[in-house]
Image: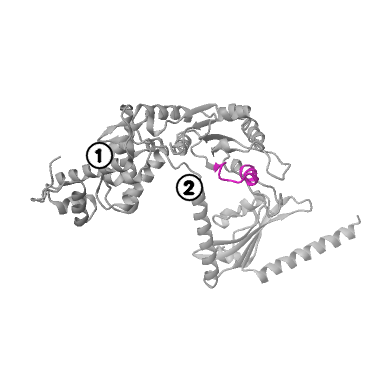
């Protein structure tokens, strides 16, 4: 290249640079240019005035943070990412600024440009206020999502001091200290989800996410994308953005896979790969993602029987069954029923903002004698119904008996558990309920010192209803109107 041509190109570049400087001066309230070391290369006079430059010392060549306190231009140079709109304070003034990385012909970042777009924020206050409100709402939504992916329960919330309860909690704590997959087996309502959360909360992964998915609640056609995610346009309606699955969301945390026994056979190989290799492949993608996830699976089904029947893969069962825990049903830890009932009643009272209800001895006896096929969940449901239907501060057997199923209530006969006397025939539910009601009437009268109005109030019924029930059970004397002795 000739000397004259080089001179011409230098002049062109010089004129272009001068034109660019003039443009910045005319369009923006301030402009600054930094190099790859975040040192100031050029700053216009408006910006110098804003930062209080004395007009004597050189600004060029100094680190940008020495001139502009807390400047983010260094981060823009290092990351190569633009920050197109930000509110930045200088000398008690709120400025709207942009920070833009500059690149050479090869796309390599060789500096950054900072621009003051507006120096009177007050006029933009409505827009900025709306922007800040949106940011705050987005932050709150993120916090709520993060909160939803934390453990909600601890071991202390698994109520019970029976031998069976202590044993399962001890096993669960040992499982929490290890990082192997856990398989929780037990009837519905026994507390499998509570223990899953407690194991995560006590494990080394406690700071990671706790993500839950119910294999029985999601249609088979959607379960694969729910677990492993989807690539953009994987199917009609999938959208143009990738959607992470539950495995990806649970990275470095725990995935609680509820009702794993209902997992479709067609998806089981993909789940096995995720457990065995720590790899997932989103639906519609050829990209393989590595995930670090501990799985806690739960089932109310007999998985061994499912393996024998060919509806559940044996290799998947063995991969899940590393740390098996069998949660006992409520009927095998009846000693825990009083404590469980008190806890449920306290929770109901706290939610309703009222004093907690109490259980009369005959009510506790009735609860302890029931078989509870729905376990703790069914017990909670019965107590919630009772507190909703009865105003009495003390719940009696008469209040609870109508809420229990016909297969449960006959177990209590005059305070005795028929399980201990199997030779005695079962009696009709109507007769058992009548006896429980008669006992409740007598107990209320005894507590009230014979004052019928007070006794009726204790039972949550009117005085007229109380008299009617006394007469029905033959507890009224024909002449004296005094309850007969038992």
Q: Residue at x 57, y 53 (%)?
A: 65
Q: Residue 240, located in which quarter of the rendered image?
A: bottom right
Can you see residue 471?
Answer: yes
Would you name the residue on which mark 2 appears?
147
What quarter of the picture does the N terminus occupy?
bottom right
Q: Is residue 359 visible?
A: no
Q: Is residue 226 magenta?
A: yes
Name which residue lies at 51% across and 27% down. Answer: 323
Q: Is residue 473 above or below residue 425?
A: below
**Marks 2/1: CA–CA distance:** 42 Å
Query: Between residues 329 and 182, which one lies in front from this camera angle?
Result: 329
**Where's residue 424, x and y in %?**
31, 29
Residue 38 located left or right of residue 143: right
Residue 277 percent across, percent down from the top left: 65, 31
The quadrant holding residue 423 is: top left
Where is residue 439, by image quadrant?
A: top left
N-terminal-most mark, 2 or 1 = 2
Secondary structure of the residue carrying tag 2 is helix
Count how many numbered circles sit on residues in the image.
2
Give the percent coordinates (x, y) of residue 115.
63, 63
Q: Quadrant of the C terminus?
A: top left
Task: Report x, y in % for residue 414.
Answer: 25, 36
Secondary structure category for the residue under label 1 = helix
* Disc 1 crowd, CA 10 A, few/some/many (<14, 14-19, 20+): many
Q: Say if the magenta span includes residue 332.
A: no
Where residue 41 is drawn, which disc sits there? none
Q: Which residues are magenta?
A: 213-228
Disc ID at residue 362:
1
Q: Residue furthest left?
A: 480
Looking at the image, residue 244 sits to the left or right of residue 404; the answer is right
């Amino acid at each position: 290249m000739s000397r004259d041509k080089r001179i011409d190109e230098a002049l062109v570049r010089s004129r272009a640079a001068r034109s660019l400087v003039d443009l910045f001066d005319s369009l923006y309230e301030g402009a600054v240019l930094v190099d790859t070391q975040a040192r100031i290369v050029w700053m216009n006079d408006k910006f110098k005035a804003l930062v209080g430059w004395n007009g004597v010392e050189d600004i060029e060549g100094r680190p940008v943070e020495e001139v502009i306190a807390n400047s983010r231009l260094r981060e823009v140079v290092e990351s190569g990412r633009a920050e197109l709109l930000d509110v930045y304070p200088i000398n008690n003034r709120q400025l709207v600024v942009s920070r833009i990385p500059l690149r050479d012909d090869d796309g390599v970042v060789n500096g950054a440009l900072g621009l003051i777009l507006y120096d009177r924020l007050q006029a933009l206050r409505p827009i900025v206020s709306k922007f800040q409100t949106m940011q705050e709402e987005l932050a709150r939504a993120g916090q709520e999502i993060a909160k939803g992916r934390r453990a909600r329960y601890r071991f202390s919330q698994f109520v019970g001091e029976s031998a069976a309860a202590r044993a399962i909690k001890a096993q669960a704590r040992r499982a929490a200290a290890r990082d192997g997959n856990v398989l929780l087996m037990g009837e519905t309502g026994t507390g499998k989800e509570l223990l899953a959360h407690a194991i995560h909360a006590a494990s080394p992964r406690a700071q990671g996410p706790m993500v839950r998915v119910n294999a029985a609640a999601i249609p088979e056609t959607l379960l694969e994308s729910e677990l492993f995610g989807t690539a953009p346009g994987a199917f009609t309606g999938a959208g143009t953005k990738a959607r992470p699955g539950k495995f990806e969301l649970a990275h470095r945390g725990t995935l609680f896979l509820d009702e794993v026994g209902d997992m479709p056979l067609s998806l089981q190989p993909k789940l096995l790969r995720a457990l065995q290799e720590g790899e997932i492949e989103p639906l519609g993608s050829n990209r393989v993602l590595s995930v670090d996830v501990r799985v806690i699976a739960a089932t109310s089904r007999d998985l061994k029987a499912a393996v024998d029947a060919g509806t559940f893969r044996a290799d998947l069962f063995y991969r899940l069954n590393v740390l098996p825990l069998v949660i006992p049903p409520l009927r095998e830890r009846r000693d825990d029923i009083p404590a469980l009932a008190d806890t449920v009643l306290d929770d109901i009272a706290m939610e309703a903002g009222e004093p907690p209800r109490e259980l009369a001895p005959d009510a506790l006896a009735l609860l302890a004698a029931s078989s509870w096929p729905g376990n703790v969940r069914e017990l909670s449901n019965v107590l919630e119904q009772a507190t909703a239907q009865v105003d009495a501060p003390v719940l009696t057997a008469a209040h609870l008996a109508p809420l229990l199923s016909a297969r449960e209530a006959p177990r209590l006969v005059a305070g005795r558990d028929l399980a201990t006397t199997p030779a005695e025939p079962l009696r009709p539910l109507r007769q058992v309920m009548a006896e429980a009601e008669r006992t409740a009437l007598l107990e209320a009268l005894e507590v009230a010192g014979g004052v019928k109005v007070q006794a009726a109030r204790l039972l949550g019924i009117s005085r007229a209803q109380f008299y009617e029930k006394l007469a029905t059970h033959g507890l009224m004397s024909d002449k004296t109107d005094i309850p007969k002795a038992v």
